[in-house]
Image (cartoon, rainbow, N blue to C red):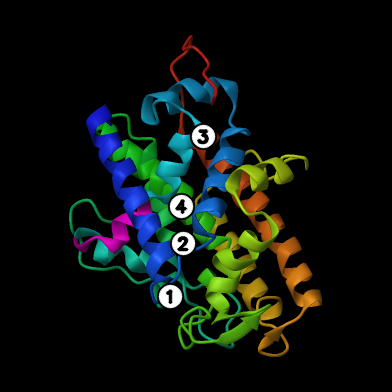
Amino acid sequence: MQNHTRLSLSRILSIACTSIALFGYSSLSFAWGHDGHTAIGILAINQTRPDVMSELQSIVNPLTRQAMAEACNWPDVYREAEEGEWSTPLHYINIPRGDEVYTESRDCPEQAHRAGRPAQFCATEAIKHYAAELSNREASPEQRWRSFAWLCHLVGDLHQPMHAGFADDRGGNDVQVSFGEWQMNLHRFWDSSLINEEAGSWQYLVGQLSEFPPVQAGTDWSPSMVNNWTNRSHTLAIEKAYPPTSNIDEAFAQQSWELIQEQIRLAASHLALIINSELTPEPGEATDSMD
């Protein structure tokens, strides 16, 4: 993307984050919040093969931590704009209660095709769509940047259990809980409140999670893997995401924090797997790294 476009996106992101802080979350909260999505992007780039870095540098330039923060949070900014309202269903996948396995034809049917949009509106299929689009060298620089941004963001979304939950409570948005002195919905607890409580910033979160070795995510990327990631997150939504009572106690908060850290690390490894598989750099290109 050109510099003037990137600066414009930075201003939009700053305005959006300020608005969220002042006026609260929308009815469908932002998965992992700004800090979680930023951490996933940075941890993934730290797992990117050296021979892939030059190709990635041509898409996200400069390839810095601030650039990761901008790209990996851009889809939330975009969906809040009028032109991006269509994209809201890309951020989650709903599976009916009583079913534990994602079924594409039932859970993410094809939509009427429009240029620049996936054919299916859910996180699971959108990840597959943008992974393929990222590797297209004939696409414009802006299109490839957006593909990376979507991919980074939606892989993060899919690993937040409430984004692979149930339609009848809108992924926990309709479940009211108390956490410490605060009243909130369960979706917000998972998205950002616990991260804010335990980490406080993406810098601290990245530092904390970097102390652990990367999760082993395999070496052979296949789009069918996303179905398995979906099923795992949905199982966590069933088994781990709902507290025994509306009052979240210390034991549930600690259990949830450990799960959040695990899921962020897993999301980063899965994102790195896609990047390493879909981007094939030209031989002899220089290797770059993040500042």
* SS of the residue under disc 4: helix
**Residue 161: where, in percent of width, then height?**
59, 69
* SS of the residue under disc 3: helix
Q: Is residue 24 left or right of residue 44?
A: left
Residue 233 within the magenta-colored segment of the rendering:
no
Q: Is residue 128 left or right of residue 222?
A: left
The earlier-in-sequence mark between 3 and 2 is: 3
Q: Examine the residues drawn in magenta and state their main secondary structure.
A: helix
Q: Which mark is residue 65?
A: 3
Q: Which mark is residue 107?
A: 1
Q: Are marks 3 and 4 in contact (CB under 8 Å)?
A: no
The earlier-in-sequence mark between 1 and 3 is: 3
Q: How far apart, in angstroms, are the residues tagged by discs 3 and 4?
A: 15 Å
Q: Amino acid at mark 2?
A: Thr
Q: How far apart, in angstroms, are the residues tagged by discs 2 and 1?
A: 10 Å
Q: Amino acid at mark 4?
A: His
The earlier-in-sequence mark between 1 and 4 is: 1
Q: Are marks 2 and 1 in contact (CB under 8 Å)?
A: yes
**Residue 232: where, in percent of width, then height?**
64, 66
Residue 79 within the magenta-colored segment of the rendering:
yes
* SS of the residue under disc 1: helix
- Other-residue count near label 4 (Cα within 10 Å), few / some / many at <14 / 14–19 / ≥20: many
Q: Residue at x 50, y 63 (%)?
A: 31
Q: Are marks 2 and 4 in contact (CB under 8 Å)?
A: no
On the image, which quarter does residue 24 sit in?
bottom left
Query: Where are the magenta residues, as a range?
Result: 75-82
User: Mark 2 sits on what residue?
Assistant: 124
Residue mark closest to the camera, 3 vs 2? 3
